[in-house]
Image: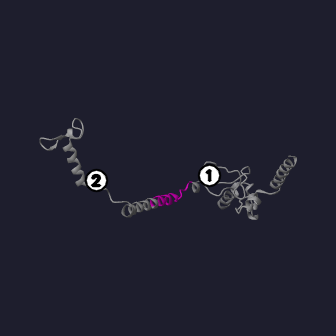
């Protein structure tokens, strides 16, 4: 009994040591899956959204020497900056302007085309099934059969008080 318990404890310790020594990427790689980096949502991130006008960080973090000199020039009076320099400074902080963010995309055309394609394909499948798969309509759907059935029901006087036969004038031979 003691040996059994010691074996269980030993295997539990070995498993914990194995888990502690292996990383999740090594475990994922051992299963044949690609490992992707997890995004740390606690760090500041950049995105262009109309709802959030000021993102957590600037668009460009790594500045070239020309960008650094322009940033130094920015600290001075803005009247000395040209429009191109002001635009460059804006593009260092933001990727898109509000009009660029508001510009509609043509994604709706792809969605409508996909829906119409699926509807057309469904119609073709229904036509094919009607022609080649479905059995022919039963003979009770024919107009001739239905006329004979109505005559038979009238001859049998089905529901003579309030139903089918009540609406037939037997003396004149026509509907009331």
Q: Is residue 81 left or right of residue 23?
A: left
Indicate the position of residue 82 as horizontal and vertical percent values. 67, 60
Task: Say which residue appears at 21% left-offset and 43% top-offset.
Answer: 156
Number of the front mark, 2 or 1: 2
Q: Is residue 150 left or right of residue 52?
A: left
Question: Which of the two residues, 51 or 100, is positioned nearer the viewer here?
Answer: 51
Task: Say which residue appears at 45% left-offset and 59% top-offset.
Answer: 116
Q: Is residue 107 left or right of residue 79?
A: left
- Residue 105 in magenta? yes
Task: Say which residue appears at 40% left-offset and 60% top-offset.
Answer: 126
Indicate the position of residue 119 as horizontal and vertical percent values. 44, 59
Instruction: Tell me if mark 1 has few (under 14), some (14-19) or many (20+) residues whose alpha carbon lies within 10 angstroms of its own.
Output: few
Residue receiving disc 1: 49
**Residue 151 marker:** none
- Residue 9 in magenta? no
Q: Earlier in the sequence, mark 2 or mark 1?
A: 1
- Can the viewer see residue 74? yes
Q: Secondary structure at mark 1?
A: loop
Question: Which of the two residues, 73 or 92, is positioned nearer the viewer here?
Answer: 92
Marks 2/1: CA distance?
Answer: 64 Å
Whether residues under marks 2 and 1 lie with C-beta atoms below 8 angstroms apart, the answer is: no
Screen quadrant of the C terminus: top left
Question: Which of the two residues, 97 or 166, is positioned nearer the viewer here?
Answer: 166
Name the image quarter holding residue 94.
bottom right
Magenta segment range? 102-116
Q: Secondary structure at mark 2?
A: helix
**Residue 140 marker:** 2
Q: Is residue 151 left or right of residue 131?
A: left
Up the image or down, 7 lies above or below 118; here it is above
- Quick one: which residue is furthest to the left in this view? 172
Question: Which of the two residues, 115 or 164, is positioned nearer the viewer here?
Answer: 164
């Amino acid at each position: 009994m003691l040996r059994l318990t010691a074996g269980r404890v030993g295997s539990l310790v070995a498993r914990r040591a194995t888990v502690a020594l292996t990383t999740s990427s090594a475990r994922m790689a051992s299963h044949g899956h690609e490992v992707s980096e997890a995004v740390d949502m606690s760090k500041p991130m950049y995105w262009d959204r109309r709802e959030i006008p000021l993102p957590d960080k600037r668009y460009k973090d790594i500045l070239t020497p020309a960008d650094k000199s322009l940033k130094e020039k920015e600290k001075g009076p803005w009247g000395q900056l040209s429009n191109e320099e002001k635009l460059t400074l804006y593009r260092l902080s933001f990727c898109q302007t509000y009009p660029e963010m508001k510009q509609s995309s043509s994604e709706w055309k792809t969605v409508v085309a996909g829906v119409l394609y699926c509807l057309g394909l469904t119609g073709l499948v229904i036509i094919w099934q009607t022609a080649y798969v479905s059995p022919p309509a039963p003979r009770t759907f024919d107009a001739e059969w239905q006329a004979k059935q109505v005559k038979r029901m009238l001859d049998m006087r089905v529901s003579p008080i309030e139903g089918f036969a009540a609406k037939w004038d037997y003396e004149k031979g026509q509907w009331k």
